[in-house]
Image (cartoon, rainbow, N blue to C red):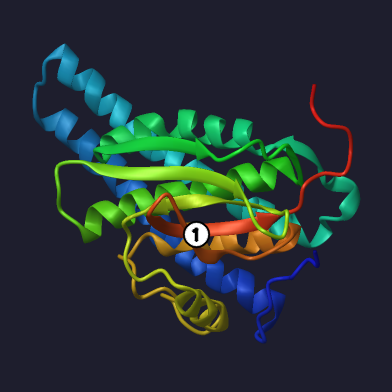
């Protein structure tokens, strides 16, 4: 399996600058949520229960912003990523951990999180912080995009992994978001550094997480691609199985 680096003819500086512009747009939402909630708390006297709920929502918004910033920092460091930094990791444990961390945020958007690991994939070879961050920011982006695209009482988000016919592991995040295709991803990569919104098919404020995840996955092994899992569509990356000893 050959690693494919994120390619952009505008050069690394243009790429990271454009990504920073997209990131600033996405960060505006959690900051606005914190600002509006804090202003409301000043103006209206809420019950103790409602005040605690508002504080929890502000905390979730802050956590979401911090996740994006941390993932962007990993992108800046990704050029230094080498084979020595890749290690055997349990993909099932990573998916479960990401789902656990994001459950309160998903609840804010009336989204049920599910984890589905088909078969026994065994350990994969990856950079654990980058893989976790990529899955996390894809998830938050799709949670927000799905609720903005489709107005309904409840939503589903699936974190899944399965073994491919090539004996590799496909891992990703799946939802009912429309407009995410291989063609849309290729176009977005070519527009990074040239357009402020490289992914116009999804709602504003949700693009940078997908672009960041794409770069993190590219730095490890393969960029994101459109994929399906249990009759749901989404974004996935392909990761090789580790040749080292299996986990006990």
Q: Secondary structure at mark 1?
A: strand
Q: Residue at x 47, y 28 (%)?
A: 100
Instruction: Confirm whether residue 59 shows in the render.
Output: no
Image quadrant in which the C terminus is located: top right
Instruction: Confirm whether residue 124 shows in the render.
Output: yes
Q: Is 77 on the left-hand or right-hand side of 83? A: left
Q: Residue at x 69, y 78 (%)?
A: 7
**Residue 56 quadrant:** top left
Q: Position of residue 53 (x, y in %)?
A: 23, 23
**Residue 103 quadrant:** top left
Image quadrant in which the N terminus is located: bottom right
Check the image and report above or below for 117 versus 198.
above
Q: Position of residue 67 (x, y in %)?
A: 52, 43
Closer-to-camera residue (173/17): 173
Q: Position of residue 226 (x, y in %)?
A: 49, 66
Q: Is 168 on the left-hand or right-hand side of 180? A: right
Q: Residues within 10 Å of mark 1 (few under 14, many from 20)?
A: many
Q: Is 24 on the left-hand or right-hand side of 204? A: right
Check the image and report above or below for 72 versus 53.
below
Check the image and report above or below for 115 versus 208.
above
Q: Position of residue 8 (x, y in %)?
A: 65, 81
Closer-to-camera residue (180/163): 163
Q: Is 109 on the left-hand or right-hand side of 210? A: left
The residue tagged 1 is 235
Q: Residue at x 15, y 48 (%)?
A: 152
Q: Residue at x 42, y 52 (%)?
A: 174
């Amino acid at each position: 399996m050959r690693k494919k680096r994120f390619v952009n003819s505008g050069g690394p500086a243009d790429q990271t600058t454009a990504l920073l512009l997209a990131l600033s747009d996405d960060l505006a939402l959690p900051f606005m949520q914190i600002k509006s909630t804090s202003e409301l708390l000043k103006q209206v006297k809420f019950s103790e229960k409602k005040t605690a709920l508002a504080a929890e929502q502000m905390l979730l918004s802050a956590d979401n912003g911090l996740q994006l910033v941390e993932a962007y920092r990993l992108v800046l460091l990704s050029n230094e990523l080498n084979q020595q930094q890749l290690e055997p990791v349990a993909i099932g444990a990573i998916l479960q951990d990401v789902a656990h961390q994001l459950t309160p945020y998903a609840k804010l958007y009336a989204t049920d999180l599910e984890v589905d690991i088909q078969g026994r994939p065994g350990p994969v070879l990856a950079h654990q912080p980058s893989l976790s961050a990529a899955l996390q920011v894809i998830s938050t982006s799709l949670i927000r995009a799905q609720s903005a695209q489709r107005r309904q009482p409840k939503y589903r988000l699936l974190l899944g992994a399965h073994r491919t016919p090539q004996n590799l592991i496909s891992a990703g995040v799946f939802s009912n978001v429309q407009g995410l295709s291989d063609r849309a991803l290729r176009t977005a990569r070519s527009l990074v550094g040239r357009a402020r919104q490289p992914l116009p098919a999804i709602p504003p404020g949700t693009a940078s997480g997908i672009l960041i995840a794409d770069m993190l996955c590219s730095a490890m092994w393969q960029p994101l691609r459109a994929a399906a899992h249990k009759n749901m569509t989404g974004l996935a990356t392909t990761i090789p199985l580790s040749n080292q000893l299996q986990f006990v």
